[in-house]
Amino acid sequence: MAGIFITLEGIDGAGKSTQAGRLAQWLEERTGRKTVRTFEPGGWPGGNSLREFILNGRGFSAMSELLMFLADRAEHVSRVILPSLRQGHNVICERWNESTLAYQSGGHELNPAHVKRIINACNFPEPDAKILIDISPETAIERVKSRKNNPDKFEAEGLAFMKTVAGFYRLIAESEPGKFIVVKSDGLNEDEVFAAITSRLEAMT
Ligand SMILES: Nc1ncnc2c1ncn2[C@@H]1O[C@H](COP(=O)(O)OP(=O)(O)O)[C@@H](O)[C@H]1O
Ligand SMILES: [Mg+2]
């Protein structure tokens, strides 16, 4: 039997990485299956150079940026996601198709219907559950600012961009109420966000 596939979405600083680690441990204990934790872009062996290229390369058109994210996902699917699921492992992945929709059509203004069609044509595996950590861009920006390393080009886009992306994420989640677990995380500490996620996942896993 294939493992469970769960994705985590949200703007930079939302708390995806924080929750991914805790969720992986929780899911492993709950299901008794190995749980692979991974991320995009670049979450495959050798993928770091493509990650750096996509996140730090300047001057790309929005369309080539979209195609680079999808090329990255295609490698991730064939080298990590599908082999893991087929071996019966669960997979927790930070960012998936909904990041592409929110950033490349919401943030970077490609036609959402076109982006959706291109994503659908890729036929990537569909997650069993998708989690949106919905945080206010103001709070997220404060958190990202306090990080030591330099922001990548998406993190550096600023408040208006983050607001657009956050708004797109909400619309996407609302369009798939059976699939998305949305946690409004402003004012919630890490334990509270985790409890909100797992209480909803318990019903699904
Ligand atoms: N619920 C929370 N309350 C306060 N700070 C948090 C919370 N969740 C995460 N953080 C902190 O916010 C920062 C961003 O979290 P992170 O998990 O790296 O976000 P993301 O992976 O979505 O960019 C980190 O410094 C993390 O420790
Ligand atoms: Mg992260």
Image: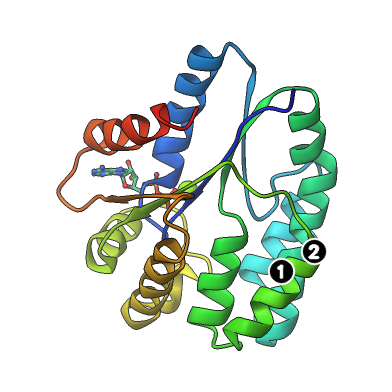
The amino acid at mark 2 is Cys
On the image, which quarter does residue 112 sit in?
Answer: bottom right
Q: Which residue is mark 2?
A: 122
Q: Nearer the viewer, residue 131 or 161?
A: 131
Q: Can residue 60 be seen in the rendering of this structure?
A: no
Tell me the SS state at disc 2.
helix
* Residue occupying image coordinates x 60% and y 87%: 110
Left of 165 or right of it: where is 145? left
Q: Residue at x 36, y 30 (%)?
A: 198
Q: Secondary structure at mark 1?
A: helix
Evaluate if marks 1 and 2 touch, with contact meaning CB atoms under 8 Å apart: yes
Give x and y (percent) for residue 37.
60, 33
Quadrant containing the N terminus is: top right
- Number of marks present in the image shown: 2
Tag 1: residue type? Ile
In percent of width and height, residue 61 lies at: 69, 88
Q: Is residue 128 left or right of residue 69?
A: left
Q: Residue at x 29, y 55 (%)?
A: 143
When the figure is inspected, residue 57 is found, relative to residue 124, above or below; the finding is: below
